[in-house]
Image (cartoon, rainbow, N blue to C red):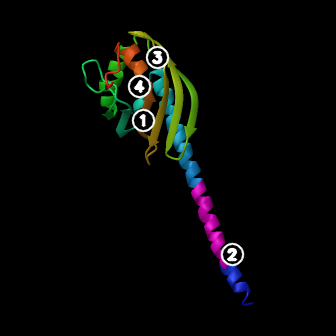
Amino acid sequence: MLRIIPFLLLFVSCSSNIQESIERKLEVEKNREVTKNIVEKNWGYISSGDMEGFKTTVSDDFKFILSGTLKWNDGRPLSRTYEGYNSFMNDFLAPALETIPGGLIFHLDEMIIDEKSAAIIWHGESEALYGEYNNKYVYVYQVNDEGLVESLTEYTDLLLSASSLLGQEKNTNFKK
């Protein structure tokens, strides 16, 4: 009988750990599903140009981050963090779309979804002010506890953007 007691204690301990593991896996899967749903909605809205719909998927403290060192032709940074939906719309998107008069056609290549984040790999087609603009992108999403997009970081070929969208003839960051 005394030999059974350590075995029972071990069994109870293992059962508790298994239960905690199952609960954690269920929580992760639930969070992944929430992330998947909001990112798919957000992507659907932005890729179709429905910016009012897009606004419903982002948090009040939403940030759009354009990675890199690209500058507008007047020297202001284009690559930077845009704080809030209004800054994203007014300071980034509206001026950027002026460089693509016919708009941008979005093509989804792949979606990778995690518990609180996602990556969307896609490519776009358009004719820009200074030539053909067929770029590739990675969008990295962060989703908050309320199930809304709190940040979206864009990675893309900025040299193509500089030449096709802005007409810049050289990389202004070149150092001899």
Q: Nearer the viewer, residue 113 or 76?
A: 76
Q: Where is residue 157 in the image (x, y as percent from the top left)?
A: 44, 24
| Alpha carbons under labels 1 and 2: distance apart | 46 Å
Disc 1 is placed on an element classified as strand
The reply to whether the magenta stretch includes residue 14 is yes
Vertical relation: 24 (above or below) 144? below
| Alpha carbons under labels 1 and 3: distance apart | 18 Å
- Amino acid at dot 1: Leu
- Amino acid at dot 2: Phe
Q: For residue 36, which quarter of the picture? A: top right
- Amino acid at dot 4: Met
Work out whether mark 2 precedes mark 4 in sequence or the reverse, and give the earlier one: 2
| Alpha carbons under labels 4 and 1: distance apart | 14 Å
**Mark 4 crowdedness (10 Å alpha carbons): few <14, some 14-19, many ≥20:** some
Q: Nearer the viewer, residue 110 or 16?
A: 110
Residue shown at the point (43%, 19%) measured from the top left: 160
Horizontal arrangement in the rendering, residue 25 relative to residue 135 (left or right): right
Residue 152 circle label? 1
Q: What stretch is highlighted in magenta?
A: 10-25
Magenta stretch, main secondary structure, is helix
Q: In which quarter of the image is the N terminus?
A: bottom right
Which residue reaches farthest front? 176
**Which residue carries the number 3 mark?**
104
**Which residue carries the number 2 mark?**
11
**Which residue carries the number 4 mark?**
51
Which residue reaches farthest bottom? 2
The reply to whether the magenta stretch includes residue 116 is no
